[in-house]
């Protein structure tokens, strides 16, 4: 699978807020595994998934691991394609400045077109 | 692209999100999502989306819920082999969660 010329486009679609359920953390785990196989990985954040990237997460009070710094470390695994849907951000009163990592903000149409181009789409 | 939805449109935003973002293709309604395939508050949204998407619903799930006889015109009923055909005939697919 990791052979040269056999690289697939993987997209991880994240639509859930962190901490309330395990989806966000599990997505991150699978993203890192996929990166180890030298695939073309991109992450999409829609709906409550945009909350995963909110700056200033402090989890001490809920005694849960704060995994938000991991998004900043993805660059080190050559995962640099992070896409956030504009409409989802705006609906939650957020802007790009509220996010803890550099992302590409896309309108819903561009996001849909990007999904169409993928070989594999995994939803979390 | 094939979009697979498995949650009721009345308790979950998966169908809403799919219809907002996706740019056409096939939508297959399975499990509790088959409630979107019959008349109800979600009907208007589904009828509007039919201009852009081809809707399918899994026969077994419709029958299990007693609603197989009231499926909206334009929704294609499929059995499990039809499900496989949809997956095989599309370049890619996405299960919306």
Image (spheres, rainbow, N blue to C red):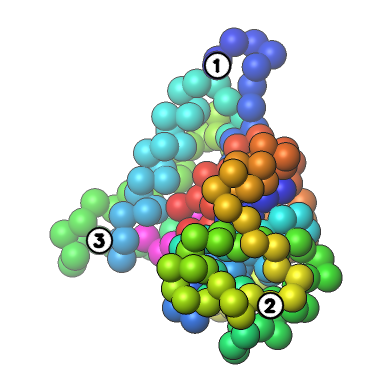
Residue drawn 37% across and 39% down? A29
Residue drawn 77% across and 78% down? B48
| N-terminal-most mark, 1 or 3 | 1
Instruction: Assess whether mark 2 and mark 1 are in contact (beta carbons under 8 angstroms).
Output: no
> Eyeballing the image, is B35 above or below B85?
below
Q: Is residue A33 magenta?
A: no
Q: Secondary structure at mark 2?
A: loop
The x, y position of residue B10, in whole percent, is 49, 81
Question: Taken as a whole, is the magenta stretch helix, strand or loop?
Answer: loop
- The residue wearing badge 3 is A59
Both labels 1 and 2 in a single chain: no
Q: Secondary structure at mark 3?
A: loop
Q: Mark 2 and mark 3: span between their CA atoms?
A: 47 Å
- The residue wearing badge 2 is B72
Dot 2: within a 10 Å radius of its alpha carbon, few (fewer than 14), some, or many (20 or more) residues? some
| Labelled disc at residue B61 | none
Q: Nearer the viewer, residue B28 or A16?
A: B28
The x, y position of residue A18, in whole percent, is 37, 60
Q: Nearer the viewer, mark 1 or mark 2?
A: 2
Q: Which residues are magenta?
A: A14-18
Tell me, yes or no, if residue A88 can be seen here.
Answer: no
Q: Nearer the viewer, mark 1 or mark 3?
A: 1
The residue at the far front in this view is B69
> Eyeballing the image, is A1 above or below B41?
above
Dot 3: within a 10 Å radius of its alpha carbon, few (fewer than 14), some, or many (20 or more) residues? few
Residue drawn 42% across and 45% down? A27
Q: Nearer the viewer, residue B1 or A17?
A: B1
- The residue wearing badge 1 is A1
Instruction: Assess whether mark 3 and mark 1 are in contact (beta carbons under 8 angstroms).
Output: no
The x, y position of residue B83, in whole percent, is 60, 48
Residue A52 sits in which quadrant?
Answer: bottom left
Q: Mark 1 and mark 2: span between their CA atoms?
A: 43 Å
């Amino acid at each position: 699978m990791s052979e040269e010329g056999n690289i697939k486009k993987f997209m991880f679609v994240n639509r859930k807020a962190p901490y309330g359920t395990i989806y966000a953390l599990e997505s991150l785990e699978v993203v890192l595994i996929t990166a180890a196989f030298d695939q073309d990985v991109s992450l999409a954040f829609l709906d409550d998934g945009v909350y995963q990237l909110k700056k200033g997460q402090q989890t001490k009070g809920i005694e849960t691991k704060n995994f938000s710094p991991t998004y900043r470390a993805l660059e080190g695994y050559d995962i640099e394609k992070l896409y956030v849907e504009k409409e989802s951000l705006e609906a939650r009163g957020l802007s790009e400045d509220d996010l803890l990592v550099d992302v590409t903000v896309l309108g819903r149409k561009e996001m849909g077109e990007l999904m169409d181009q993928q070989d594999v789409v995994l939803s979390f | 692209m094939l979009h697979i939805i498995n949650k009721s449109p009345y308790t979950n935003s998966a169908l809403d999100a799919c219809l907002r973002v996706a740019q056409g293709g096939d939508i297959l309604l399975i499990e509790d999502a088959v409630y979107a395939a019959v008349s109800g508050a979600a009907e208007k949204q589904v009828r509007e989306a039919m201009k852009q998407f081809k809707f399918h619903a899994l026969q077994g799930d419709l029958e299990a819920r007693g609603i197989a006889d009231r499926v909206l015109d334009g929704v294609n009923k499929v059995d499990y082999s039809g499900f496989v055909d949809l997956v095989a005939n599309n370049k890619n697919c996405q299960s919306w969660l």
